[in-house]
């Protein structure tokens, strides 16, 4: 973290590009490591814009602030399932080796997770942020 992330101005793209090179020069490494910044940015946007609407009061860190009840539980489970689905989709290419194998694996899913990530990213960019709470 301190060697690349902070020195690159907290650039996820630079950090994961360096990680891809560090792991080796196989295309699957680059596909995986260049998808992770998109996933991370979508998650950050989602947490900043959707969490306050669905789980108000949750500070994002302490589970003691997470709301009790069915809405919070279902939301948490849904977020976990979606995250695991995307992670499983993207890490499959890590061990594929060639570009052909990597694209065949991703193509078997019609590249839909990548498309969904980009669409959700675009939507979250234009989705309004919730109003800030006024502190007295």
Image: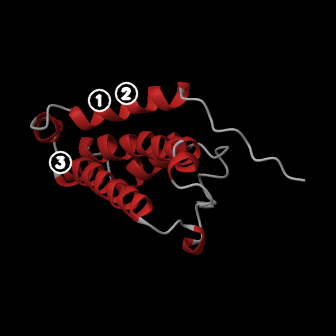
Task: Of the two numbered discs 2 and 3 on the same chain, state the one appearing first in sequence.
Answer: 3
Residue at the farthest right position: 136
Residue 120 lies, with reference to residue 51, above or below; the image says above
Judged by depth in the image, the label closer to the viewer, 2 or 3, is 2
Residue 79, how many percent across, how many down? 37, 54
> Callout 3: few (<14), some (14-19), or many (20+) C-alpha neighbours within 10 Å?
some
Q: Quadrant of residue 2?
A: bottom right
Quarter holding residue 131: top right
Q: Which residue is mark 2?
A: 119
Secondary-structure class at tag 3? loop
Task: Judge by depth and name the residue closer to the eye, 91 or 132.
Answer: 132
- The mark nearer the N terminus, 1 or 3, is 3
52 or 9: nearer the viewer? 52
* Label 1 close to label 2 by CB (< 8 Å): yes
Instruction: Residue 97: give its label.
Output: 3
Residue highlighted by disc 1: 115
Q: Describe residue 17's horizontal placement relative to residue 24 as left or right.
A: right
Q: Residue at x 53, y 65 (%)?
A: 67
Question: Residue 58 placed where, x, y %?
Answer: 59, 61
Give percent across and percent down for residue 17.
45, 44
> In the rendering, at what x and y percent does residue 13 appear?
50, 40
Q: Give the alpha-carbon distance from disc 1 to disc 3, as whole Å.
A: 23 Å
């Amino acid at each position: 973290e301190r060697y690349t992330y902070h020195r690159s101005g907290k650039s996820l793209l630079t950090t994961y590009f360096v990680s891809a090179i560090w792991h080796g020069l196989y295309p699957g490494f680059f596909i995986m490591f260049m998808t992770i910044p998109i996933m991370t940015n979508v998650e950050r946007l989602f947490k900043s814009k959707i969490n306050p609407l669905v789980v108000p009061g949750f500070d994002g860190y302490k589970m003691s602030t997470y709301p009790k009840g069915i809405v919070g539980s279902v939301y948490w489970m849904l977020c976990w399932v979606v995250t695991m689905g995307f992670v499983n989709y993207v890490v499959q290419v890590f061990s594929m080796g060639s570009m052909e194998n990597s694209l065949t694996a991703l193509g078997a899913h019609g590249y839909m997770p990548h498309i969904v990530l980009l669409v959700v990213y675009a939507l979250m960019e234009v989705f309004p942020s919730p109003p800030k709470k006024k502190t007295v």
